[in-house]
Structure formats: structure tokens, C-alpha cells
Image (spheres, helix red, strand yellow):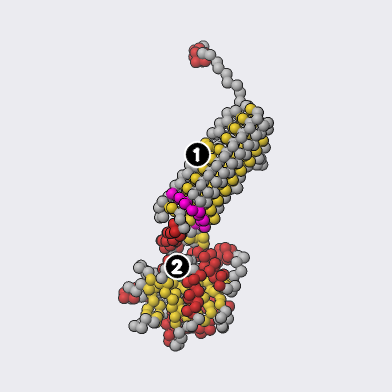
Amino acid sequence: MSLSVLILAAGKGRRMKSAFPKVLQKLAGRPMIDYVLTVAKKLTSKVIVVVGSQQEILREHLAGSQLEFVEQLQQFGTGHAVAQALPKLSDTGAVLILSGDVPLLTDEVVSQLIECGSSCDVAVLTSHLDNPDGYGRIIRNKEGKITSIVEHVDADHTQRLIKEINTGIMVARAEFLQEVIPRIEARNGQNEYYLTDCVRIALELNKKVGSVFLNDALLGLGVNDRAQLAVTERKLQVRKVENLMRDGVTVADPSRIDIRGELFCGKDVFIDINTVFLGRVVLGDGVTIGSNNVISDSEISSSAKILSNCVIQNCFVGRGAQVGPFSHLRPESVIGDGGKIGNFVEIKKSNIGTMSKVNHLSYVGDSVVGEHVNIGAGTITCNYDGENKHETIIEDAAFIGSGSQLVAPVTIGAGSIVGAGSTITDNVNADSLAVSRVRQKSIPEWRKRKKSIKNQ
Ligand code: UD1
Ligand code: CA
């Protein structure tokens, strides 16, 4: 049977109190609607999104995703939203209705629902919540068959005690929707057209209603406000960490880690508290991550150590290297095997060779540093002349004395030494010593002389 997917995303998201559409709020760093789209796209090429409130922003976000859009200019409820899409739905086939604010559904769950839907007119996905406040409740008869769904605001005291809830996800035959959706009325506490009413109407018309119960309630959670966003975020993080731990990663405290993207770990990785991983991060075997780091889109090779309080963006850190504490590795930097980057060091778009060290208080930008180089404390590569960036090349085994400035473009030859406190503006030949500072003077009896000048 052909399948279309309809994603409801036109709602105001009033409870979020945001200038942006609710479905663009991020969970684990990713807009909620993107999760829903990923599931939808795997099922069919016919994905229709109902947009309305703040639709310009949403359409811009979804541009290029090969979707069909349906406008719901005024948001009169989920039933009304589906009604706007009826002209785009064929009269045959199945329609899976997803909600832009129910982001964690999986392919397996959806397939199960579609399977159930293939033998009925409409099938809903339900789950159990200890605190079902705000959700539609599933009303079943003595035989256990669903008879209706009652929204929280319309539910009476006994109905509110029911903990089986409607996830908002359903699958229906297209012809069923064409027949039933126009019959939905807005006679309820919110004066809205409730999609959920199609269950009651189905039974009145002797149609077959099915349901699938979702054991793992997290996968069907709806996110309406920032409190639910935070709760869902934490639950999702815990789930991600559990998977990591199952794969052999030691996490100091599973409640103090944030993975906003994908984190791939080798064996025997240790992650201390409060690190945020963004984008795609790969940690090799035996990597140690200290506390309070922010690591985005980077690869940290085996046995490397990232000490506390570092920011690492789009970098490659070689095997056995050590970074931190308090280092900032900016995009397109490579730290070679066994390299050391220490306290208050900023590396930008530079290649630091194998076993080279930049241990304290330095800035190395737009540079190519060879192997076994030692860059002393407080060294600055002066890569910017006010208009353009220039490159610094430091060849193998060079030694840069503390407090030096290397004015780019400049090359420091292999095995050479730059004397501490030098300002280097010309290339330094291999194996030579370059010192540019003024020779130290010593003026005897300076204090006495100053006093006598004052008294004159
Ligand atoms: C809905 C269900 C409720 C269920 C809950 C699960 C109805 C009437 N209620 O309630 O039974 O327990 O989801 O999360 O369906 N939308 C539109 N147009 C509108 C209104 C909403 O496109 O006019 C979209 C929203 O953008 C959202 C989705 O439909 O993505 C659900 O709407 P929302 O207002 O969040 O419904 P709930 O009150 O959560
Ligand atoms: Ca909702």
C-alpha cells in the first residue's frame, strides 16, 4: 500500500513563549523537526508538512528538503491542520500522521504502527506516563477496546487518573481521513478541531480502530514548553550515555555530560564531568577527557589526554598528545602524535608536528610547526598585519625562547634557536641562533643619581 507522511507543524507553540517556531527548538543540539523528518524520509518520498505560525522561518529551515507544504493560516487545531492537507492526499493508501513536537520516535516504532494500521482504518500510538498532565487520555471499554481520546482540558476527574496517553501519532487509510476529518467539530474546551475525535467518529461509523502501545514512553514524549524540553533533553542524554557505557566508556557522572551530536568512542575511554560534545566527535582507545571541556567536530586519537577546561573546535589531536588545562584549539588545527599544548595556549589553523610542545601562554596561528619543536612561554606568532594573515613556519627541532614574537611571514630554520624576548622579522637559518633584543645595560648607582637630579 502506498504511504504518505503528514507532519503537523503549524501550531503556535504558545507555551514555548518564543519568537521561533516550537518545532525548531533544539533537543541535543538538533531542531525537533529534523528528527521527525529523518524518520519520515526513510519511509516515503511523499512527505507533507503543515505549516502556519511563523512559517517563513520554518520554510527557510526546511528549504531544499524536498517536501510538500500545506498552509494552515489560522491554527484551529490538529483536526483542522489535517483537513488543510486532504486535497494533497490521494484517496487510497495509508497516511502516517506525525507531530513536529514528538521528536524521538524511531523507525521500529513507526513500522510497528504502520503494520497495525494495515489491518484497520485508523491506528493510534499510545504510551503510559506517570504524570500524564496535558496529554490526551485513552479511554477504553471493558473489553479493552479504545472508544475515544479525551484531551486533558476536557477530561473529568476520573478520566484524568488514566495514565495511558495519546502520543499524537497515528496512521489511517486515506479514504478514512477523507470521510471522517470533515465531520470533526470544534465543540470542546478549547474550541478546536481535535484530530483525536476521529477515533470516536470511526466507531460511530463502524470503522476499525487499532492501537500500538509504546513501552518506552520517552520515544513518544511531546514537547510543549521549556520545562518539557529540558526533561526530554535530560532523558535523551541519559539514554545516549547509557549506550556509551554499554559500549565500554567510563563516564564519571552520567548526569553531567552533554552530547549534542554524535560521539564515537573506542575502548577504555574515560570522560570526567561537565564536558559538552558538539557535532561529530571521535575519541580513540584510551582517551581521557578531563572536566569542563567543550569539544566540537574533532577527532582525538588513542591515548591522548585532554585535561580540564579546554575548548577544541574542528581539530585533530594525535596519538598520546596532551592538551590543557585551559587550552583553546581553534578550527583546522592538527596536534601531532605526542604533542603538548598547555595552559592558556591558543592554536589557530596550525599544524603542530609530532612531539612538539607549546606549553604556556602562547598564540600560534596560521603556522606550520615541525617535529620536536619547543615553543617557550609567551610566544606569539604575529600572523595579522592589519589587512592580511601570513604564515609562520617553524622547522623541526627549533627552539623558540620565551616571550618571542615571530612576525609572519617568517621561517625559523630547523634546529635553530630564537633567544628569549626576540622580535623576529627575518627568516632564521637552520642551526643558528637569532637574538633581536637590545643587549642588557647595567648603570651603576642609578638610585643615587636619580635622587641628586631631583634635589637640584
Ligand atoms: C496533542 C493531542 C493529544 C496528545 C498530544 C501528544 C490533539 C487534539 N491532541 O495535544 O491528545 O496527547 O498531542 O503530544 O491532537 N498543530 C497544527 N495546527 C494546529 C494545532 C496544532 O499544525 O492548529 C501541530 C502543532 O504544531 C504540533 C502538533 O500539531 O506539532 C500537536 O499540537 P499541540 O498543540 O502541541 O497538541 P497537544 O496539546 O500537545
Ligand atoms: Ca504537543
Residue drawn 51% across and 83% down? 176
Residue 384, numbered circle: none
Residue drawn 40% across and 53% down? 253
Look at mark 1 in the image and give the residue it sits on.
Answer: 343
Residue type pointed to by label 2: Leu
Earlier in the chain: of badge 1 and badge 2, it is 2
Q: Residue furthest bottom?
A: 206
Percent x, y of residue 351: 61, 43
- Location of residue 414 (image quadrant): top right
- Disc 1 to disc 2, C-alpha distance: 43 Å
Q: Magenta stretch: dominant SS?
A: strand
Q: Tag 2: Cα neighbours inside 10 Å, few (<14), some, or many (≥20)?
A: some
Asked whether disc 1 touches disc 2, contact meaning CB atoms under 8 Å apart, the reply is no
Percent x, y of residue 169: 47, 73
Residue drawn 61% across and 35% down? 397
Considering only vertical position in the picture, is 310 above or below 381? below
Residue 219, numbered circle: 2
**In the rendered structure, does residue 417 fall within the stretch colored magenta?**
no
Q: Tag 1: Cα neighbours inside 10 Å, few (<14), some, or many (≥20)?
A: many
**In the rendered structure, does residue 261 fall within the stretch colored magenta?**
yes
Q: Is residue 316 visible?
A: yes
**Secondary structure at numbered mark 1:** strand
Q: Is residue 373 left or right of residue 201?
A: right
Percent x, y of residue 371: 61, 39
| Highlighted range, magenta | 260-272
Q: Is residue 390 left or right of residue 15?
A: right
Residue type pointed to by label 1: Asn
Residue drawn 48% across and 60% down? 27
Considering only vertical position in the picture, is 299 above or below 356? below
- Location of residue 230 (image quadrant): bottom left
Percent x, y of residue 14: 45, 65
